[in-house]
Image (tube, rainbow, N blue to C red):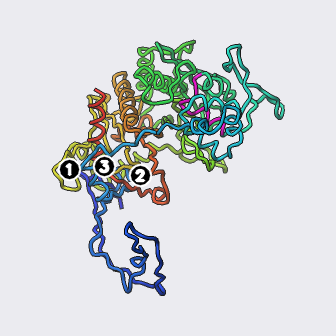
Amino acid sequence: MFNSSVTPHGFRVGVHKPSYTVANFRGPAEIRSLGQNEKGATVDNASNFPDGPVQEKEARWIYEIVNPLVFRGATYIDSSWAKARADDPGLIRIAPPENCSLSAVLAKHCGPEELGAVLQELPRPVLYDLAANSTDGEELVQLAENCCRFIHGDDGLPTGLRYVEKNGSMRADIDDFELFETIANNPFLPDIYKEVMVLRPGVQGGSEIVGEFRQDRTHVYEYLRRNSYIPWGHFAANMAEDAIRYRTSELDLTDMRAMRHLYYQRSYVTLAGRLGIDVDVRAGKMSEDELERLRLSLVSALAKEGEKGKIHPATLWGWNFGYDFSGSGCRLHASHQMIHQQYAMVPERVTTLDGGETAAYGCGDLVADTIAGYRRQYDRDFFVDYLAAIRTNTRMDGRDLPASLIVYEDSSVMVFVPKAQVSQWELQIMVTADEDGIPVGNIFEADSRVRAAIDAAILRIQHIYAAMGARMVTSIEYPKRTGARNGQRLIYAFLPKLPWSMGAFSEAQLRFISGHFPEDFARACRAQMADAG
Protein backbone atom coordinates (compact mmCIF):
# COMPACT_ATOMS: atom_id res chain seq x y z
CA MET A 1 0.00 0.00 0.00
CA PHE A 2 1.31 3.47 -0.92
CA ASN A 3 1.29 5.62 2.22
CA SER A 4 2.17 9.32 2.16
CA SER A 5 0.78 12.19 4.22
CA VAL A 6 0.20 14.08 0.95
CA THR A 7 -3.23 13.50 -0.61
CA PRO A 8 -5.22 15.34 -3.28
CA HIS A 9 -7.04 17.03 -0.40
CA GLY A 10 -4.03 18.20 1.64
CA PHE A 11 -2.02 16.59 4.44
CA ARG A 12 -3.27 13.48 6.24
CA VAL A 13 -2.35 13.41 9.94
CA GLY A 14 -2.94 10.51 12.33
CA VAL A 15 -3.42 10.89 16.07
CA HIS A 16 -2.91 8.39 18.89
CA LYS A 17 -5.15 8.87 21.97
CA PRO A 18 -3.76 6.20 24.29
CA SER A 19 -6.16 4.50 26.73
CA TYR A 20 -5.30 1.04 28.01
CA THR A 21 -4.94 -1.44 30.89
CA VAL A 22 -1.66 -3.22 31.67
CA ALA A 23 -1.65 -6.59 33.42
CA ASN A 24 0.62 -6.64 36.48
CA PHE A 25 2.97 -9.67 36.63
CA ARG A 26 5.23 -8.19 39.32
CA GLY A 27 6.21 -10.02 42.49
CA PRO A 28 6.08 -8.62 46.04
CA ALA A 29 6.50 -4.87 46.43
CA GLU A 30 9.92 -3.61 47.53
CA ILE A 31 9.11 -0.31 49.19
CA ARG A 32 12.26 1.68 49.98
CA SER A 33 13.18 5.14 51.08
CA LEU A 34 14.46 7.47 48.38
CA GLY A 35 15.38 10.26 50.77
CA GLN A 36 13.62 13.12 52.56
CA ASN A 37 11.71 16.24 51.59
CA GLU A 38 12.40 19.75 52.85
CA LYS A 39 10.37 19.05 56.01
CA GLY A 40 12.31 15.88 56.86
CA ALA A 41 9.53 13.47 55.87
CA THR A 42 10.51 10.27 54.07
CA VAL A 43 10.11 10.11 50.29
CA ASP A 44 9.63 6.51 49.12
CA ASN A 45 9.02 4.53 45.95
CA ALA A 46 5.54 3.16 46.80
CA SER A 47 4.06 4.63 43.60
CA ASN A 48 6.36 2.37 41.59
CA PHE A 49 4.70 -0.74 43.05
CA PRO A 50 0.96 -0.55 42.38
CA ASP A 51 -1.44 -3.34 43.35
CA GLY A 52 -3.30 -5.00 40.49
CA PRO A 53 -3.55 -3.85 36.87
CA VAL A 54 -2.33 -0.41 35.82
CA GLN A 55 -4.85 1.77 33.97
CA GLU A 56 -4.14 4.69 31.69
CA LYS A 57 -7.46 6.34 30.97
CA GLU A 58 -6.31 9.29 28.89
CA ALA A 59 -2.65 9.71 28.00
CA ARG A 60 -1.45 12.75 26.06
CA TRP A 61 -2.09 12.72 22.36
CA ILE A 62 0.66 11.77 19.94
CA TYR A 63 0.37 12.93 16.33
CA GLU A 64 1.70 10.58 13.64
CA ILE A 65 2.59 12.03 10.23
CA VAL A 66 3.90 9.73 7.54
CA ASN A 67 6.53 11.62 5.60
CA PRO A 68 5.36 13.10 2.27
CA LEU A 69 8.39 11.31 0.78
CA VAL A 70 7.48 7.82 1.94
CA PHE A 71 11.05 6.48 2.13
CA ARG A 72 11.78 8.92 4.98
CA GLY A 73 9.58 7.19 7.56
CA ALA A 74 7.18 8.97 9.91
CA THR A 75 7.26 11.74 12.51
CA TYR A 76 5.65 11.60 15.96
CA ILE A 77 4.82 14.84 17.76
CA ASP A 78 4.17 14.81 21.51
CA SER A 79 1.25 17.20 22.03
CA SER A 80 2.28 18.34 25.52
CA TRP A 81 5.86 19.15 24.50
CA ALA A 82 4.67 20.89 21.35
CA LYS A 83 2.08 23.01 23.21
CA ALA A 84 4.79 24.80 25.19
CA ARG A 85 6.56 25.79 21.98
CA ALA A 86 3.31 26.81 20.34
CA ASP A 87 2.75 29.16 23.28
CA ASP A 88 6.30 30.53 22.93
CA PRO A 89 8.24 29.71 19.72
CA GLY A 90 11.19 31.56 21.25
CA LEU A 91 11.86 28.37 23.22
CA ILE A 92 13.09 26.81 19.96
CA ARG A 93 16.78 27.58 20.31
CA ILE A 94 20.02 26.26 21.80
CA ALA A 95 21.73 28.34 24.46
CA PRO A 96 25.19 29.54 23.40
CA PRO A 97 28.09 27.62 24.99
CA GLU A 98 29.46 29.06 28.20
CA ASN A 99 33.02 30.33 28.45
CA CYS A 100 35.30 27.43 29.36
CA SER A 101 38.87 27.73 30.59
CA LEU A 102 40.43 25.15 32.86
CA SER A 103 43.59 27.26 32.96
CA ALA A 104 41.68 30.17 34.47
CA VAL A 105 40.40 27.90 37.24
CA LEU A 106 43.79 26.32 37.90
CA ALA A 107 45.53 29.72 37.91
CA LYS A 108 43.63 30.53 41.13
CA HIS A 109 45.32 27.62 42.85
CA CYS A 110 48.76 27.20 41.30
CA GLY A 111 51.52 29.09 39.53
CA PRO A 112 52.42 29.11 35.79
CA GLU A 113 54.85 26.18 36.01
CA GLU A 114 52.42 23.97 37.92
CA LEU A 115 49.66 25.01 35.49
CA GLY A 116 51.61 23.75 32.48
CA ALA A 117 52.44 20.49 34.22
CA VAL A 118 48.80 19.85 35.12
CA LEU A 119 47.64 20.41 31.52
CA GLN A 120 50.23 17.90 30.29
CA GLU A 121 49.12 15.23 32.76
CA LEU A 122 45.34 15.46 32.33
CA PRO A 123 43.64 12.11 31.59
CA ARG A 124 42.93 11.57 27.90
CA PRO A 125 39.10 11.88 28.16
CA VAL A 126 39.46 15.18 30.01
CA LEU A 127 41.88 16.43 27.34
CA TYR A 128 39.41 15.57 24.58
CA ASP A 129 36.59 17.43 26.30
CA LEU A 130 38.79 20.43 27.01
CA ALA A 131 40.05 20.51 23.42
CA ALA A 132 36.48 20.50 22.12
CA ASN A 133 34.96 22.98 24.58
CA SER A 134 37.63 25.42 25.70
CA THR A 135 37.06 29.05 24.73
CA ASP A 136 40.51 30.07 25.93
CA GLY A 137 42.83 30.60 22.94
CA GLU A 138 46.02 30.52 25.01
CA GLU A 139 44.93 27.28 26.66
CA LEU A 140 44.25 25.72 23.26
CA VAL A 141 47.69 26.81 22.05
CA GLN A 142 49.28 25.10 25.03
CA LEU A 143 47.31 21.92 24.35
CA ALA A 144 48.41 22.06 20.70
CA GLU A 145 52.07 22.57 21.60
CA ASN A 146 51.85 19.55 23.91
CA CYS A 147 50.36 17.14 21.35
CA CYS A 148 52.57 17.76 18.30
CA ARG A 149 55.86 19.35 17.24
CA PHE A 150 55.82 22.80 15.58
CA ILE A 151 58.44 24.80 13.68
CA HIS A 152 58.43 28.37 15.04
CA GLY A 153 59.55 31.67 13.57
CA ASP A 154 61.56 34.35 15.34
CA ASP A 155 58.31 35.83 16.65
CA GLY A 156 57.42 32.55 18.35
CA LEU A 157 54.48 31.83 16.06
CA PRO A 158 54.28 28.50 14.25
CA THR A 159 55.39 28.38 10.62
CA GLY A 160 54.87 24.66 10.03
CA LEU A 161 54.87 21.18 11.55
CA ARG A 162 57.85 18.96 12.29
CA TYR A 163 57.81 15.86 10.05
CA VAL A 164 59.31 12.43 10.69
CA GLU A 165 59.68 9.38 8.45
CA LYS A 166 57.18 6.60 9.20
CA ASN A 167 56.86 3.47 7.07
CA GLY A 168 58.73 5.05 4.18
CA SER A 169 56.74 8.31 4.06
CA MET A 170 56.95 11.65 5.81
CA ARG A 171 54.30 12.19 8.49
CA ALA A 172 53.68 15.08 10.86
CA ASP A 173 55.03 14.32 14.34
CA ILE A 174 51.74 14.06 16.24
CA ASP A 175 51.29 12.23 19.56
CA ASP A 176 47.48 11.84 19.42
CA PHE A 177 45.77 12.44 16.09
CA GLU A 178 42.21 12.69 17.51
CA LEU A 179 43.34 15.24 20.09
CA PHE A 180 45.26 17.13 17.39
CA GLU A 181 42.17 17.29 15.14
CA THR A 182 39.88 18.32 17.98
CA ILE A 183 42.14 21.20 18.99
CA ALA A 184 42.53 22.34 15.38
CA ASN A 185 38.75 22.30 14.85
CA ASN A 186 38.00 24.50 17.86
CA PRO A 187 36.98 27.97 16.54
CA PHE A 188 38.76 29.65 19.46
CA LEU A 189 42.22 28.38 18.46
CA PRO A 190 44.21 31.28 16.91
CA ASP A 191 43.99 31.26 13.11
CA ILE A 192 47.73 30.81 12.54
CA TYR A 193 47.56 27.50 14.42
CA LYS A 194 44.48 26.40 12.43
CA GLU A 195 46.35 27.12 9.22
CA VAL A 196 49.50 25.28 10.17
CA MET A 197 47.66 22.28 11.65
CA VAL A 198 44.85 21.59 9.16
CA LEU A 199 44.16 24.36 6.63
CA ARG A 200 47.31 24.90 4.58
CA PRO A 201 47.04 22.94 1.29
CA GLY A 202 48.83 19.61 1.62
CA VAL A 203 48.89 19.42 5.40
CA GLN A 204 46.00 16.91 5.44
CA GLY A 205 47.35 14.73 2.65
CA GLY A 206 48.02 14.57 -1.06
CA SER A 207 44.58 15.46 -2.44
CA GLU A 208 45.13 17.53 -5.58
CA ILE A 209 43.63 21.03 -5.96
CA VAL A 210 41.79 21.00 -9.30
CA GLY A 211 39.62 24.12 -9.02
CA GLU A 212 39.59 27.51 -7.34
CA PHE A 213 37.38 30.54 -6.78
CA ARG A 214 38.83 33.90 -5.68
CA GLN A 215 36.82 37.09 -5.28
CA ASP A 216 37.13 39.88 -2.72
CA ARG A 217 37.58 38.24 0.70
CA THR A 218 36.40 34.85 -0.61
CA HIS A 219 38.79 32.07 -1.54
CA VAL A 220 37.75 28.44 -2.09
CA TYR A 221 39.80 25.42 -3.22
CA GLU A 222 38.34 22.40 -4.98
CA TYR A 223 40.08 19.19 -3.89
CA LEU A 224 39.92 15.83 -5.67
CA ARG A 225 39.19 12.98 -3.23
CA ARG A 226 40.88 10.09 -5.03
CA ASN A 227 40.01 7.48 -2.40
CA SER A 228 36.24 7.79 -2.97
CA TYR A 229 33.99 5.03 -4.29
CA ILE A 230 32.37 7.56 -6.68
CA PRO A 231 33.35 7.27 -10.38
CA TRP A 232 34.55 10.36 -12.32
CA GLY A 233 35.92 11.84 -9.09
CA HIS A 234 34.64 12.91 -5.69
CA PHE A 235 35.30 16.56 -4.92
CA ALA A 236 35.36 18.85 -1.91
CA ALA A 237 35.06 22.64 -2.05
CA ASN A 238 36.87 23.97 1.03
CA MET A 239 37.25 27.54 2.23
CA ALA A 240 40.97 28.33 1.93
CA GLU A 241 43.49 29.17 4.65
CA ASP A 242 43.20 32.89 3.84
CA ALA A 243 39.39 32.82 4.10
CA ILE A 244 38.81 31.00 7.38
CA ARG A 245 35.14 30.28 8.16
CA TYR A 246 34.44 28.13 11.22
CA ARG A 247 30.91 29.43 11.80
CA THR A 248 28.02 29.66 9.34
CA SER A 249 27.22 33.11 10.72
CA GLU A 250 30.53 34.22 9.14
CA LEU A 251 29.45 33.15 5.63
CA ASP A 252 28.38 35.75 3.10
CA LEU A 253 26.68 35.35 -0.26
CA THR A 254 29.97 35.43 -2.18
CA ASP A 255 31.28 32.54 -0.05
CA MET A 256 28.18 30.50 -0.79
CA ARG A 257 28.24 31.35 -4.49
CA ALA A 258 31.89 30.32 -4.65
CA MET A 259 31.37 26.86 -3.21
CA ARG A 260 28.25 26.26 -5.26
CA HIS A 261 29.87 27.61 -8.45
CA LEU A 262 32.58 24.98 -8.19
CA TYR A 263 29.87 22.34 -7.76
CA TYR A 264 27.95 23.52 -10.82
CA GLN A 265 31.12 23.85 -12.89
CA ARG A 266 32.43 20.40 -12.03
CA SER A 267 29.05 18.72 -12.58
CA TYR A 268 28.47 20.43 -15.92
CA VAL A 269 31.95 19.59 -17.19
CA THR A 270 31.63 15.97 -16.06
CA LEU A 271 28.29 15.54 -17.84
CA ALA A 272 29.69 17.28 -20.93
CA GLY A 273 32.40 14.63 -21.07
CA ARG A 274 29.76 11.89 -20.95
CA LEU A 275 27.84 13.56 -23.79
CA GLY A 276 30.89 14.19 -25.97
CA ILE A 277 30.76 17.98 -25.63
CA ASP A 278 34.18 19.68 -25.68
CA VAL A 279 34.86 22.19 -22.92
CA ASP A 280 37.66 24.74 -23.01
CA VAL A 281 39.51 23.95 -19.79
CA ARG A 282 41.91 26.64 -18.70
CA ALA A 283 43.34 28.14 -15.54
CA GLY A 284 40.81 29.93 -13.41
CA LYS A 285 37.05 29.39 -13.36
CA MET A 286 34.26 29.64 -15.89
CA SER A 287 32.23 32.84 -15.83
CA GLU A 288 28.50 32.75 -15.13
CA ASP A 289 27.82 33.36 -18.83
CA GLU A 290 30.15 30.53 -19.87
CA LEU A 291 28.57 28.24 -17.33
CA GLU A 292 25.08 29.05 -18.60
CA ARG A 293 26.08 28.48 -22.23
CA LEU A 294 27.51 25.09 -21.30
CA ARG A 295 24.32 24.23 -19.40
CA LEU A 296 22.18 25.02 -22.43
CA SER A 297 24.39 22.77 -24.55
CA LEU A 298 23.85 19.99 -22.03
CA VAL A 299 20.08 20.50 -22.04
CA SER A 300 20.03 20.35 -25.84
CA ALA A 301 22.15 17.18 -25.96
CA LEU A 302 20.02 15.48 -23.30
CA ALA A 303 16.86 16.35 -25.23
CA LYS A 304 18.29 14.62 -28.30
CA GLU A 305 19.15 11.58 -26.17
CA GLY A 306 15.60 11.37 -24.83
CA GLU A 307 14.41 9.36 -21.82
CA LYS A 308 15.44 6.11 -23.53
CA GLY A 309 19.04 7.25 -23.94
CA LYS A 310 21.91 5.61 -22.06
CA ILE A 311 23.17 8.70 -20.22
CA HIS A 312 21.13 9.42 -17.07
CA PRO A 313 23.55 10.18 -14.23
CA ALA A 314 22.56 12.05 -11.09
CA THR A 315 24.36 14.59 -8.95
CA LEU A 316 25.43 13.92 -5.39
CA TRP A 317 25.83 16.97 -3.13
CA GLY A 318 26.15 17.26 0.62
CA TRP A 319 27.55 19.30 3.48
CA ASN A 320 28.34 18.27 7.02
CA PHE A 321 28.86 21.44 9.04
CA GLY A 322 30.23 21.30 12.55
CA TYR A 323 32.88 19.15 14.22
CA ASP A 324 32.58 17.64 17.70
CA PHE A 325 34.41 14.96 19.63
CA SER A 326 33.45 13.44 22.97
CA GLY A 327 35.66 12.51 25.88
CA SER A 328 34.66 8.88 25.31
CA GLY A 329 36.41 9.00 21.94
CA CYS A 330 33.38 9.26 19.65
CA ARG A 331 33.43 11.71 16.76
CA LEU A 332 29.98 13.28 16.77
CA HIS A 333 29.73 14.89 13.35
CA ALA A 334 31.86 16.22 10.48
CA SER A 335 35.51 15.46 9.86
CA HIS A 336 36.32 19.15 9.80
CA GLN A 337 34.87 22.33 11.28
CA MET A 338 36.03 24.50 8.36
CA ILE A 339 33.18 25.30 5.92
CA HIS A 340 33.22 22.83 3.04
CA GLN A 341 30.87 21.00 0.67
CA GLN A 342 31.28 17.70 -1.17
CA TYR A 343 29.90 16.59 -4.50
CA ALA A 344 30.18 13.98 -7.23
CA MET A 345 28.21 12.31 -10.03
CA VAL A 346 26.35 9.01 -9.64
CA PRO A 347 26.23 6.72 -12.72
CA GLU A 348 23.16 5.05 -14.14
CA ARG A 349 24.38 1.49 -13.67
CA VAL A 350 27.07 -0.39 -11.77
CA THR A 351 28.68 -3.70 -12.80
CA THR A 352 27.92 -6.68 -10.56
CA LEU A 353 30.48 -9.25 -9.45
CA ASP A 354 29.07 -11.83 -11.86
CA GLY A 355 29.57 -9.49 -14.83
CA GLY A 356 26.01 -8.23 -15.04
CA GLU A 357 24.63 -4.80 -14.21
CA THR A 358 22.36 -3.25 -11.64
CA ALA A 359 21.05 0.26 -11.01
CA ALA A 360 23.46 2.51 -9.13
CA TYR A 361 21.95 4.04 -6.00
CA GLY A 362 20.99 7.72 -5.92
CA CYS A 363 18.81 9.22 -3.19
CA GLY A 364 16.83 11.27 -5.72
CA ASP A 365 15.61 8.00 -7.24
CA LEU A 366 13.63 7.43 -4.04
CA VAL A 367 11.72 10.64 -4.73
CA ALA A 368 11.00 9.33 -8.22
CA ASP A 369 9.61 6.14 -6.63
CA THR A 370 7.29 8.27 -4.46
CA ILE A 371 6.06 10.14 -7.53
CA ALA A 372 5.36 6.85 -9.31
CA GLY A 373 3.57 5.37 -6.30
CA TYR A 374 1.45 8.49 -5.88
CA ARG A 375 0.38 8.39 -9.52
CA ARG A 376 -0.63 4.74 -9.18
CA GLN A 377 -2.63 5.55 -6.04
CA TYR A 378 -4.37 8.76 -7.13
CA ASP A 379 -3.62 9.18 -10.85
CA ARG A 380 -2.33 12.66 -10.03
CA ASP A 381 0.97 14.58 -10.00
CA PHE A 382 2.64 14.30 -6.58
CA PHE A 383 4.39 17.67 -6.56
CA VAL A 384 1.30 19.55 -7.72
CA ASP A 385 -0.60 18.17 -4.73
CA TYR A 386 2.38 18.53 -2.37
CA LEU A 387 2.74 22.23 -3.15
CA ALA A 388 -1.02 22.69 -2.74
CA ALA A 389 -0.91 20.93 0.65
CA ILE A 390 1.92 23.20 1.84
CA ARG A 391 0.10 26.34 0.72
CA THR A 392 -3.24 25.31 2.30
CA ASN A 393 -1.79 23.74 5.46
CA THR A 394 -3.88 23.74 8.66
CA ARG A 395 -2.66 23.17 12.22
CA MET A 396 -3.16 19.71 13.66
CA ASP A 397 -3.80 21.05 17.17
CA GLY A 398 -6.72 23.24 16.00
CA ARG A 399 -5.44 26.36 17.77
CA ASP A 400 -5.95 29.84 16.36
CA LEU A 401 -2.24 30.36 15.67
CA PRO A 402 -0.28 30.88 12.43
CA ALA A 403 -0.52 27.78 10.24
CA SER A 404 1.95 28.55 7.44
CA LEU A 405 4.84 26.13 6.87
CA ILE A 406 6.56 28.57 4.50
CA VAL A 407 9.59 30.41 5.87
CA TYR A 408 10.59 32.25 2.69
CA GLU A 409 9.59 32.21 -0.97
CA ASP A 410 10.55 33.95 -4.20
CA SER A 411 9.80 33.24 -7.86
CA SER A 412 12.23 30.31 -7.99
CA VAL A 413 12.40 28.57 -4.60
CA MET A 414 10.42 27.93 -1.45
CA VAL A 415 12.02 27.48 1.98
CA PHE A 416 9.61 25.57 4.20
CA VAL A 417 9.26 23.32 7.22
CA PRO A 418 8.25 19.81 6.15
CA LYS A 419 5.02 18.64 7.79
CA ALA A 420 6.91 15.54 8.97
CA GLN A 421 10.43 16.47 10.08
CA VAL A 422 13.04 13.69 10.16
CA SER A 423 15.20 15.91 12.35
CA GLN A 424 13.93 18.43 14.84
CA TRP A 425 14.43 21.83 13.16
CA GLU A 426 14.53 20.32 9.67
CA LEU A 427 14.08 22.80 6.82
CA GLN A 428 13.82 22.14 3.11
CA ILE A 429 14.22 24.04 -0.13
CA MET A 430 11.98 23.12 -3.03
CA VAL A 431 12.65 24.61 -6.45
CA THR A 432 9.28 25.89 -7.67
CA ALA A 433 10.53 27.28 -10.99
CA ASP A 434 9.95 25.57 -14.33
CA GLU A 435 12.26 25.25 -17.34
CA ASP A 436 10.30 25.35 -20.62
CA GLY A 437 7.17 24.28 -18.75
CA ILE A 438 8.91 21.37 -16.98
CA PRO A 439 9.61 21.43 -13.20
CA VAL A 440 13.28 22.04 -12.44
CA GLY A 441 14.44 18.72 -11.00
CA ASN A 442 18.24 19.03 -11.01
CA ILE A 443 20.99 21.61 -11.41
CA PHE A 444 21.23 20.95 -15.17
CA GLU A 445 17.70 22.29 -15.56
CA ALA A 446 18.39 25.28 -13.28
CA ASP A 447 19.35 28.48 -15.15
CA SER A 448 21.46 31.30 -13.68
CA ARG A 449 18.47 32.87 -11.93
CA VAL A 450 17.39 29.62 -10.28
CA ARG A 451 20.94 28.71 -9.26
CA ALA A 452 21.36 32.11 -7.61
CA ALA A 453 18.06 31.65 -5.77
CA ILE A 454 19.13 28.21 -4.48
CA ASP A 455 22.48 29.56 -3.28
CA ALA A 456 20.85 32.47 -1.46
CA ALA A 457 18.26 30.17 0.14
CA ILE A 458 20.97 27.82 1.45
CA LEU A 459 22.75 30.79 3.01
CA ARG A 460 19.49 32.07 4.51
CA ILE A 461 18.83 28.70 6.16
CA GLN A 462 22.34 28.44 7.59
CA HIS A 463 22.06 31.94 9.05
CA ILE A 464 18.73 31.00 10.68
CA TYR A 465 20.34 27.95 12.26
CA ALA A 466 23.33 29.98 13.44
CA ALA A 467 21.01 32.49 15.12
CA MET A 468 19.16 29.65 16.86
CA GLY A 469 22.40 28.11 18.12
CA ALA A 470 22.67 25.01 15.91
CA ARG A 471 26.31 23.97 15.63
CA MET A 472 26.03 20.74 13.61
CA VAL A 473 23.96 20.59 10.41
CA THR A 474 23.82 18.00 7.62
CA SER A 475 22.58 19.23 4.23
CA ILE A 476 21.70 16.97 1.29
CA GLU A 477 20.30 17.25 -2.21
CA TYR A 478 17.54 15.07 -3.73
CA PRO A 479 18.03 15.48 -7.51
CA LYS A 480 16.19 14.03 -10.49
CA ARG A 481 18.11 11.85 -12.93
CA THR A 482 19.12 13.73 -16.08
CA GLY A 483 16.67 13.29 -18.93
CA ALA A 484 13.77 12.07 -16.76
CA ARG A 485 10.32 13.59 -17.34
CA ASN A 486 8.34 12.65 -14.25
CA GLY A 487 7.41 16.00 -12.67
CA GLN A 488 10.12 15.70 -10.00
CA ARG A 489 11.27 18.93 -8.37
CA LEU A 490 14.73 19.54 -6.92
CA ILE A 491 14.71 19.39 -3.10
CA TYR A 492 17.35 20.14 -0.49
CA ALA A 493 16.98 18.94 3.11
CA PHE A 494 18.76 20.53 6.10
CA LEU A 495 19.04 18.39 9.22
CA PRO A 496 20.46 19.91 12.42
CA LYS A 497 21.84 17.57 15.04
CA LEU A 498 20.54 18.75 18.40
CA PRO A 499 22.09 17.93 21.82
CA TRP A 500 18.89 16.26 23.05
CA SER A 501 18.05 14.51 19.77
CA MET A 502 21.12 12.73 18.42
CA GLY A 503 19.29 9.65 17.08
CA ALA A 504 18.70 6.20 18.58
CA PHE A 505 16.67 3.05 17.92
CA SER A 506 13.52 4.98 17.00
CA GLU A 507 15.37 6.93 14.33
CA ALA A 508 17.00 3.72 13.09
CA GLN A 509 13.45 2.53 12.33
CA LEU A 510 12.69 5.86 10.58
CA ARG A 511 10.44 6.89 13.47
CA PHE A 512 11.33 10.51 14.26
CA ILE A 513 10.24 12.09 17.55
CA SER A 514 9.58 15.84 17.67
CA GLY A 515 8.80 18.25 20.49
CA HIS A 516 7.23 21.02 18.40
CA PHE A 517 4.61 21.49 15.73
CA PRO A 518 6.10 22.26 12.30
CA GLU A 519 4.04 25.45 12.04
CA ASP A 520 5.66 26.81 15.21
CA PHE A 521 9.15 26.08 13.96
CA ALA A 522 8.26 28.01 10.80
CA ARG A 523 7.16 30.91 13.04
CA ALA A 524 10.47 30.78 14.90
CA CYS A 525 12.43 30.82 11.62
CA ARG A 526 10.48 33.78 10.25
CA ALA A 527 11.15 35.62 13.51
CA GLN A 528 14.90 35.03 13.12
CA MET A 529 14.79 36.44 9.58
CA ALA A 530 12.88 39.49 10.82
CA ASP A 531 15.44 40.04 13.60
CA ALA A 532 18.26 39.82 11.05
CA GLY A 533 16.57 42.31 8.76
Q: Position of residue 211 (x, y in %)?
A: 56, 20
Q: Amino acid at mark 3?
A: Lys
In magenta segment, residue 447: no
Q: Is residue 480 visible?
A: no
From the image, which quarter does the N terminus lie in?
bottom left
Q: Residues within 10 Å of mark 1 (few under 14, many from 20)?
A: some
Give how far across and how far down residue 188 sits, in percent.
Answer: 54, 30
Residue tagged by mark 3?
419
On the image, the x and y values in percent for residue 166 come to: 82, 33
Marks 3/2: CA distance? 12 Å
Residue lying at the far left in this picture: please name it: 400
| Residue drawn at (58%, 46%) of the image | 326
The dot on residue 72 is: 2
Q: Amino acid at mark 2?
A: Arg
Distance, label 3 to label 1, CA atoms, is 10 Å
Q: Which residues are magenta?
A: 179-191
**Residue named by callout 1:** 394
Judge whether 452 appears above or below 525 on screen: above
Query: Observer-nearest residue: 94 or 135?
Result: 135
- The quadrant in which residue 114 appears is top right
| 77 on left or right of 326 | left
Q: Classify the position of the C terminus by image quarter.
A: top left
- Element type where label 3 sits in the image: loop
Report whether 472 appears left or right of 416. right
In the rendered structure, which disc, 3 or 2, sits on the residue that comes first in sequence?
2
Note whether residue 94 is visible.
yes
Up-down: is 46 above or below 448?
A: below
Sequence-first disc among 1 and 2: 2
Q: With 298 as the anchor, is 104 left or right in this view?
A: right
